[in-house]
């Protein structure tokens, strides 16, 4: 597997992101980056981003969690942020991303009593990990995400996004993030989302991920996701559904998760108003406070 590594100077002077990266090796020599902030002895709150962002997306959430006396660990998925980037779209599979992330969290970092927070692809990976390793997980937070099995069609807006990514000769990462936000991103923020990708050859991960979402019942990832649903719907772990009111892609999943997840029963699930798909960008401080309150209360 040919891999690329983004030069460190691309990440100089990031707006509002003073956190130093740490690294661990997974798979066959891939380096994954993560950011560990807050009270070291506290139970870890793992923050998993999605397509096409990186841990920078969680900067406001990380600040709130640390201020509440918690420990936040934000991860750069393989192919994103400071993590190594397999150079071919075919190097990326759903199963590999689950395994790479599992190895980082549970083998290299040996985390337990995890609060698993996932948005977008971070949920597709994090929910699988929570279902397959419940002994490691104390709580779950789903934020604008889901766990598709291919049995229910994806919304039309998602197909337009997938087709646009596939057809774009130049993939404008910052523009994709902006399209998922209600607020206007400053140039500094747009530059931070572009930072991991000096050229088109670094973008195999963002190009591949939309096509890895299960779209038919016979998708290679569908059986594992169905099995995860069966576990999660009976798992006795507190399950917070923290969605925005403005996500056309995943918004319909919020009531389903509240109704079907055993751990969601009896909890007050926030609806974060005025935020789009990337609610961490539009309302990260509010999301961080909801997560901190959830962890503290449970």
Image (cartoon, rainbow, N blue to C red):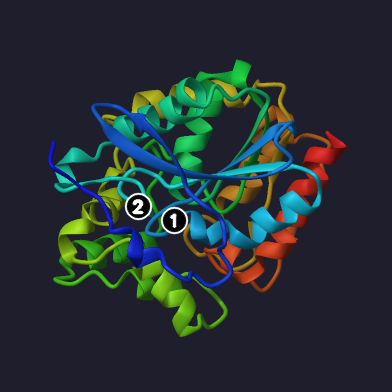
Mark 2 — residue? 80
The image position of residue 255, as x and y in percent, is 65, 48
Q: Residue at x 28, y 56 (%)?
A: 6
Along the horizontal axis of the image, is 151 left or right of 294? left
User: In what element is the residue under mark 1?
Assistant: loop
Q: Which label's residue is closer to the chain start, 1 or 2? A: 1
Q: Secondary structure at mark 2?
A: loop
Instruction: Name the spot of residue 22 as percent of width and height, x first.
Output: 47, 42
Q: How many marks?
A: 2
Q: Quadrant of residue 286?
A: bottom right
Nearest the eye: 74 or 182: 74
For label 2, the crowd category at 10 Å Cα-Cα, with few meaning under 14, some 14 to 19 and many 20 or more, is: many
Q: Residue 238, how many percent across, how many down?
A: 74, 31
What's the distance in space between the residues labelled 1 and 2, CA to CA? 6 Å
Q: Is residue 269 visible?
A: no
Q: Residues within 10 Å of mark 1 (few under 14, many from 20)?
A: many
Q: Is residue 77 visible?
A: yes
Residue 53 quadrant:
bottom left
- Residue shown at 34% from the left, 35% from the top: 97
In this rendering, is residue 182 above or below 77?
below
Q: Residue at x 66, y 21 (%)?
A: 235
Depth order, front residue of 66/260: 66
The residue drawn where x is 79% and y is 43% is 294
Instruction: Tell me whether the residue at label 1 lies in contact with that at label 2, contact meaning CB atoms closer than 8 angstroms.
Output: yes
Which residue does the numbered mark 1 point to in the structure image? Answer: 54
Horizontal side, residue 237 vs residue 216: left or right: right
For residue 195, the mark is none
Image: 118 above or below 265? below
């Amino acid at each position: 597997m040919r891999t690329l590594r983004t030069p460190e100077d691309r990440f100089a002077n990031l707006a509002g992101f003073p956190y130093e990266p740490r690294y661990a090796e997974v798979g066959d020599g891939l380096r994954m980056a993560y950011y560990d902030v807050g009270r070291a002895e506290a139970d870890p709150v793992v923050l998993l981003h999605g397509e096409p962002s990186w841990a920078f997306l969680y900067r406001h959430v990380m600040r709130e969690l640390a201020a509440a006396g918690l420990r936040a660990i934000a991860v750069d998925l393989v192919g994103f942020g400071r993590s190594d980037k397999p150079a071919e779209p075919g190097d990326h599979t759903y199963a590999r991303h689950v395994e790479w992330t599992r190895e980082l969290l549970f083998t290299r970092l040996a985390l337990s009593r995890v609060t698993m927070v996932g948005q977008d692809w971070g949920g597709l990976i994090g929910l699988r990990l929570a279902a397959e390793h419940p002994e490691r997980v104390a709580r779950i937070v789903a934020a604008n995400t889901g766990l598709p099995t291919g049995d229910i069609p994806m919304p039309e807006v998602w197909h337009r996004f997938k087709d646009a990514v596939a057809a774009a000769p130049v993939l404008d990462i910052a523009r994709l993030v902006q399209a998922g936000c209600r607020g206007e991103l400053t140039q500094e923020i747009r530059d931070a989302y572009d930072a991991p990708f000096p050229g088109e050859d670094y973008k195999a991960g963002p190009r591949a991920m939309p096509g890895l979402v299960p779209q038919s019942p016979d998708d290679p990832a569908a059986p594992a996701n169905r099995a995860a649903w069966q576990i999660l719907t009976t798992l006795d772990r507190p399950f917070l559904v923290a969605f925005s009111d403005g996500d056309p892609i995943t918004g319909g999943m919020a009531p389903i998760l509240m109704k079907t997840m055993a751990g969601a029963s009896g909890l007050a699930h926030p609806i974060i108003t005025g935020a789009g798909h990337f609610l961490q960008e539009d309302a990260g401080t509010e999301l961080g406070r909801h997560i901190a309150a959830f962890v503290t209360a449970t």
